[in-house]
Image (tube, rainbow, N blue to C red):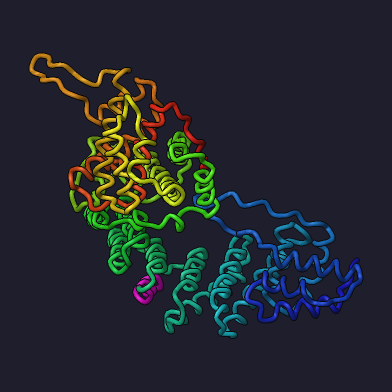
Amino acid sequence: MPQIEPSVLTALMAAAKDAVSNAAAAFSLTAMDVGSSTTVEQQRDALVAALRRRPSEVLKAREEAREAPPIPPTTPTQLEIWSLYADHVDDPLLRGHLHHLLLDAGHGRRPDHVRGAASGYLDAAQLLLAAQDGHGLPRAARCLKRAGELSLKFKQHDVRERATKDALALAERLLASAEDEGGPLLVVLETLQTLDCDVADLAERAADLFARDVDVRLGFLDALRKDAGASRHTEIDAAVVHTLLDAADTADAGHRRLYLLTEAATQAQKRGLPDLRARAEMALQQTTPEWTSIRPEGTIPRTLIAGQQARVDAAEDLRTALWLTVQDIHPAMRAQAEAEADGALEGLLRIPRSRINPAGPVFVRPPVEANDDLAVAMQVRGLGLFGILTAIQLDRIHERFRPDEFEMTAALAHEAVLPEPRARTLARAFCYYWLEEFDAAACVALPQVEQILRELLRSRVPVVSVAWGPSPGGVDLLGKLLKSMPEAGYPADWSRALELLLVDPDRGMNLRNNILHGLADTPPKHHVALILQAALYLLSHAHGQRMAPDPTA
């Protein structure tokens, strides 16, 4: 039977004193000199392992339970050392922690460890509250939560009564002083609800008192709804959505505002509040997402940026470098459907909704609500990533080759698909792009994309219809040309990608129509890069070039 080593116990108490967390105590204990004997080092290492170990969650709501990461196995020697020290440490938080670990491991008598852990946490909460430092209040709230859950799960009625009494006292203290941001109070109210206490009055007061913190206020409103009568549910649901809308009104335009409005629309949809959902969607239509103008280096990992640039640096000439910007889009288009099955995105993408039109509050209703709305939205995001990658490579091409209009014309020209006069026009689009004249670059390039595609398809599928009866005949336009690509032997994924990019008015970027019809402001750089990439993709087929592999696949 091992014996407590005094040097280890002293070091353990010193490490735990004033430590802001068990991990910090473990770090301190590791650095302390406790002696060099095998027994001393073995006990110190076992206690360091205990401090670094997190006890299991006592209670989990079934709908919130997730598969926990595997817990490293404990050895019988470690368990004996934990049991040896559990009742001999003066620090109540450490005592509760050790008993909780032993309870998890099934070591010794379970009732002893339940009471040891719960009473340790309750004593620790009072000491932490008395300390009044910056970390004491949140840690005290978590200690009360663990003690309450242990008492409930293992039917320790006296401990449950004490936990309830202490939690109620702390809740009243926090409401009276408003000394924190509200997070610890929310933990306390959730603990009281776990202990079957009605916290409707406390939650309502807290929601009014901490209205400045939107996330905490939402937590209080959810707590209120659990204990309020059914007659108040609609009122509380409306308060939730109004909280999100009000926070969005004061948020800077960008990711935060977009998130709040998205969440407001989502919650309004879930809670059956169509008027508030419409208000949120109208506000969303007038919000330009920050990522439309985000700098590439702020979005793409540096290693990937370097990889894109290195590909251009390895090209032997300008034409080869241009073909290297055409990456295989197939994996991205397929990955989106897989991500949808995994439920990767929440929020607005899951709402049956009108299309968000960045040009203004104009509603365009899709004819039907498609089952693949989420997959398509993620495909559009994937296109945005390809645009940023292409922009990185186009910038590198300009840095390395500094091509003028004549050099670009020679690199792009193709006798059948893009003869020299049209190649010169497309070359001007690239030059405008490098001058950051994005409007001009897009307006010049888009007609050339359509013309290149028409010439590519001409020998494989009909692209001109003759007059027949009342129909005057004519030339197929871009939308129909894109739908004809699979029939002509081109990948269906690329056909769909170009359709989303250029002509889909309901769920895609619709760049051709928005730009050429004057329905959008100056397009962001990576959208114009996508248009130029579309031209290069089509030309690569004409020149018989193989697409570069996708570095993000």
Query: Which residue is drawn at the image coordinates 74% and 57% (left, top)?
Result: 106
489 or 131, which lies in front? 489
Furthest residue in direction top, as rendered: 469
Query: Which residue is drawn at the image coordinates 9% and 14% (left, top)?
Result: 469
User: Number of numbered discs present?
Assistant: 0
Q: Is residue 228 magenta?
A: no
Asked if residue 11 is positioned above or below residue 457 in the image, the reply reads below
Left or right of 137 on screen, residue 485: left
Asked if residue 417 is positioned above or below residue 171 in the image, the reply reads above
Q: Which residues are magenta?
A: 202-211
Picture quadrant where residue 472 is located? top left
State the image coordinates of residue 75 (x, y, percent, origin top left).
81, 57
Asked if residue 2 is positioned above or below residue 398 in the image, the reply reads below
Residue 213 makes an appearance in the image: yes
State the image coordinates of residue 404 (x, y, percent, origin top left).
35, 46
Picture quadrant where residue 212 is located? bottom left
State the image coordinates of residue 323 (x, y, percent, origin top left).
44, 36
State the image coordinates of residue 367 (x, y, percent, origin top left).
22, 35
Query: Which residue is drawn at the image coordinates 36% and 63% (left, top)?
Result: 228
The quadrant of the rendering that contains the N terminus is bottom right
Asked if residue 334 is positioned above or below residue 10 in the image, the reply reads above
Left or right of 501 on screen, residue 144: right
Query: Which residue is drawn at the image coordinates 34% and 54% (left, top)?
Result: 292
Picture quadrant where residue 157 is located? bottom right
Q: Is residue 205 magenta?
A: yes
Residue 345 makes an appearance in the image: no
532 or 138, which lies in front? 532
Left or right of 228 on screen, residue 78: right
449 or 212, which lies in front? 449
Furthest residue in direction front, as rendered: 406
443 or 387, which lies in front? 443
Main secondary structure type of the part rendered in magenta:
helix
